[in-house]
Amino acid sequence: MIVVTGATGNIGRPLTQALAETGREVTAVSRHTAAVPEGVRHVTADLAEPGSLKPALAGAKALFLLLSGDLHATGANPADIIGEAADSGVRRVVLLSTLGVVTRPSGRTRIAMRALEDTLRESGLEWAVLRPGGFASNALWWADSIRAQQVVAAPFGDIGVPVIDPADIAAVAAACLLDDRYTGGAYELTGPEVITPRQQTEAIAAALGSPLRFHELTRDEARTAMAQSMPTELADDTLDILGSPSPAELRVSPDVQRVLGRAPRPFADWATRNVAAFR
């Protein structure tokens, strides 16, 4: 059996579907009750409390671990999840990390994630680490303004990074969970090309079949808006990357091609598949 945490999100949902289609037993884990593919078991658990995962891990041989905000929940010790997995008989863990552990290793979030990577490597379990850069699905932040005003408001309109389709992250995760060839590796996951917010706006407009206006925010305006839904430290950190990406953050990685045997999907493909969110 394979356990997928974060199973209702942009990565976990397609990963759960892909694994179920192989005929494997799959357990989908999320904080709240949710619909899952037919034949998939669903278990509610809070990863900030590793003991709550015990029912999900019973009988499992592999685990996809996506922590999100649970990495910094009050009193949380994500390393305990690795211990719970090992104690439950799990043999393989695929961890969703971040490219930032390589490109900007001094930030609080990246220090904690790198420590978790190290715990996994030293656990004695089979492992793989996925390090994606920016997500194509972050464009969903613009959905409300597109629907209401046909406007995308974002900073740094002409500065881009090679954002990755979450479905490609899910596909690489599935390969690492199912194929022994991909254990013991850390995979940097990016899209096929650098794309700017202005270019993303054009791709969404093309998918909609109607024009959109791009409005460039100042950094302060963007920081104020982002701070409403994330800690100020994280907002500043994100803006540093978006406004001044390093050469490593601009690099198009070959790892998706190496694992999947195909190029990563372009942003326009993501926009077409998710166009309903913007209507």
Image: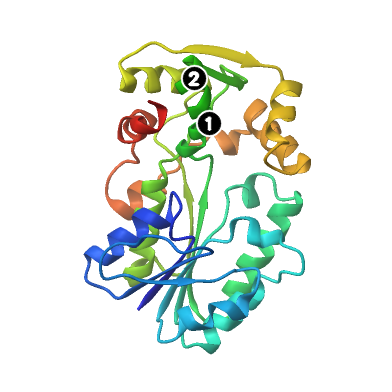
Q: Is residue 51 left or right of residue 273?
A: right
Residue 53 appearing in the image: yes
In which quadrant of the rendered view does residue 92 lie? bottom left
- In the image, what residue type sits under mark 2? Ala
Q: Which is nearer the eye, 85 or 97?
A: 85
Residue 196 x, y percent position in the rendering: 51, 22
Specify which label sits upstream in the sequence, 2 or 1: 2
> Looking at the picture, which amino acid does disc 1 mark?
Val
**Circle 1 Cα neighbour tier, 10 Å, few/some/many (<14 / 14–19 / ≥20):** many
- Name the residue: 39% across, 10% down: 211
Tag shown at residue 148: 2
Task: Give the residue number, with chain letter if any, for mark 1.
Answer: 161
**Residue positioned 67% across, 37% down in the render:** 238
Kindly report the distance in space between the C-alpha atoms of the residues bearing marks 2 and 1. 27 Å
Q: Position of residue 246 (x, y in %)?
A: 64, 33
- Which quadrant does the N terminus fall into? bottom left
> Up-down: is 23 above or below 196?
below
Residue at position x 57%, y 73% from top? 121
Looking at the rendered structure, the secondary structure element under dot 1 is loop
Q: Is 186 located above or below residue 223 in the figure?
A: below
